Amino acid sequence: MTERIRNIAVGLIVRGEHVLAEEYPASDRHPRFLRAIGGGIDFGETAEEALRREFQEELDVELGEVAQLAVTENHFTLAGRRGHEIVHVFGIHCAALEGMPLDERRANGDSRSIVGWFRLDDLGEDALPFYPNGILEIARGLA
């Protein structure tokens, strides 16, 4: 596979000391981790359009207000493959998700991940990793 830079858009909802995120279970290729919800930006789409599409496809919800918070760069290796992402990070509002109970888990319609609320204090390099790189600090700034 050809190496490339991937542009993605992710959204953050922080409620008190919790952040809504996708949980990927441990496998023989990687340990358990969290990822901000979102996905790839298609050709001709703005980052905001991609974000709204991804939340519709993955969780069947419409986003309300969104505000771009940052653009970060993420270099990583997953399952032996190098990755490089330009990450458009948005603070988002979504009544359907903001009202979700803290202990509820929802299947992500686009992958094998589960979406739920996670305590910010339980996340980090020495705890449960939260990707893309730099997203935890941005989420903590919203708390």
Image (tube, rainbow, N blue to C red):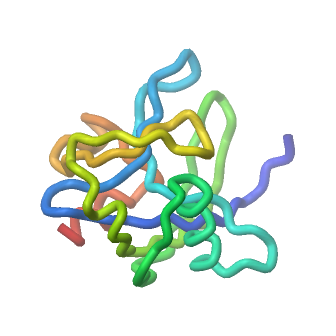
Compared across the picture, whether 60 is left or right of 104 comes to: right
Tell me what residue is drawn at x 21 percent, y 48 percent.
Answer: 102
Q: Position of residue 75 (x, y in %)?
A: 57, 52
Compared across the picture, whether 101 is left or right of 51 comes to: left
- The image quadrant of residue 18 is bottom left
Tell me what residue is drawn at x 32 percent, y 67 percent.
Answer: 138
Q: Position of residue 20 (x, y in %)?
A: 33, 54
Q: Position of residue 70 (x, y in %)?
A: 44, 77
Compared across the picture, whether 140 is left or right of 73 comes to: left
| Count of number-bearing discs | 0
**The N terminus appears in which quarter of the rendering?**
top right
- Residue 55 lies, with reference to residue 79, above or below; the image says below
Tell me what residue is drawn at x 50 percent, y 75 percent.
Answer: 71
Task: Farthest residue to the right: give it.
Answer: 2
* Residue nearer the viewer, 113 or 71: 113
- Residue 69 lies, with reference to residue 113, above or below; the image says below
* Residue nearer the viewer, 93 or 31: 93
* Residue nearer the viewer, 47 or 113: 113
Q: Position of residue 121 (x, y in %)?
A: 16, 47
Tell me what residue is drawn at x 35 percent, y 60 percent.
Answer: 97
Task: Farthest residue to the top: give it.
Answer: 28
Compared across the picture, whether 32 is left or right of 18 comes to: right
- The image quadrant of residue 41 is bottom right
- The image quadrant of residue 129 is top left
- Residue 104 lies, with reference to residue 67, above or below; the image says above
**The C terminus appears in which quarter of the rendering?**
bottom left
- Residue 80 lies, with reference to residue 94, above or below; the image says above
